[in-house]
Amino acid sequence: AYCRRLLLEGARDEMPEFVAGDHLLIFAPNAEDVVLDVADRLGVELEAVLRLEALGREKLPILCDGNRVRVDDLLRRCVELSAPLTELSQEMLRLLAQGEAEGTQFSAGETLSMVRAVRTCPSLKVKAEDLITLCPVMEPRVYSIASTGGPTIEIFVSHSGGLCASYLEDLPPGAEIPMASVRSSDFHMPDGSSPLILLGVGSGVAPLAGFVRKLHGEWKSGAFERRTTHE
C-alpha cells in the first residue's frame, strides 16, 4: 500500500508544541453519504437537538455543549456509523428486526455496522438518542509526526480505505481539519551517546523521518554529536 504525504500548516502561535516521534490525533467525520442515508432511513431530522442523559454526556465529551447535541453533529462526528457494532448492540438490532420479511433479516453470524443494519432492514427503527448506546463512540485516528516542530506538521497516510484515510485523501489543498490535536509519545530520540539504527516500513517511516531531520538540524547547527547510523 502506498503512503500519501500530508502537510498541516498554521500560524506559529496557534500550532501545538511537538517533537519528532509525537502523535497527531485526528477525528474524521463519517462520510456524508453515510450520514444522510442513516438519517433518511431512520427518519430523523438532522437539525433536531437531543437532550443527553448522564451516559450520553460521559460517552461524548468532545462535542457536547452542556447536555445537548444536534443530530447532525451526533451522526457526523460523535458515533461510528460504519464500524462493527458490539455483540450486544448487534443482538439488540436483531431483536428489533425480527419482524422483517424472510431474506432481509440479519444472519446469525453476520457482523453489522449501523449503516449496514439500516440498509439491510429498511423498516428498522432506532431513535437518534439510542445511537449513543448502540454505536461505538468516535475515536481519534493516531498518526506519527514526521516533522520536528514549527508551524508545519507532516504525516504519512496509508491508502487503507479506512474512515480517516479516506477523509484525508479527499481533502483539497488548503482545507481545514477542525478536530486535530497533538499527543506526546514515549518514542523519542535517544541521547547522543547511543548508536542509532533506524528501521521502518510503510507509514512507519514517519517518526524515523522526523528523527533524521532532527539529526540533520543538529548537524547544521553544530550541535551534532558523534552518532553512527546504518540503513
Image: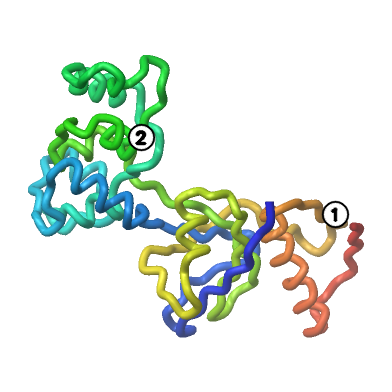
| Residue 61 visible in the picture | no
Amino acid under label 1?
Ile
Q: Which mark is residue 197?
A: 1
Q: Measuring 82% from the left and 79% from the top, which residue is drawn there?
A: 219
Residue that badge 2 annotates: 113
Instruction: Tell which of 28 and 224 is nearer to you.
Output: 28
* Total marks placed: 2
Q: Measuring 47% from the left and 54% from the top, which residue is drawn there?
A: 164
- The reply to whether discs 1 and 2 touch (Cβ–Cβ < 8 Å) is no
Q: Is residue 122 above or below residue 196?
A: above
**Secondary-structure class at tag 2:** loop
Q: Position of residue 169 (x, y in %)?
A: 52, 63
Q: Is residue 171 above or below residue 32?
A: below
**Mark 1 against mark 2, which lies toward the viewer?**
2
Q: Measuring 32% from the left and 57% from the top, which residue is drawn there?
A: 32
Rendered image quadrant of residue 126: top left
Instruction: Tell which of 35 and 62 is nearer to you.
Output: 35
Q: Position of residue 132 (x, y in %)?
A: 22, 40
Q: Is residue 224 left or right of residue 115?
A: right
Amino acid under label 2?
Ser
Q: Is residue 75 above or below residue 120?
A: below
Q: Position of residue 154 (x, y in %)?
A: 60, 70
Give the mark, 1 or 2, whose residue is nearer the N terminus.
2
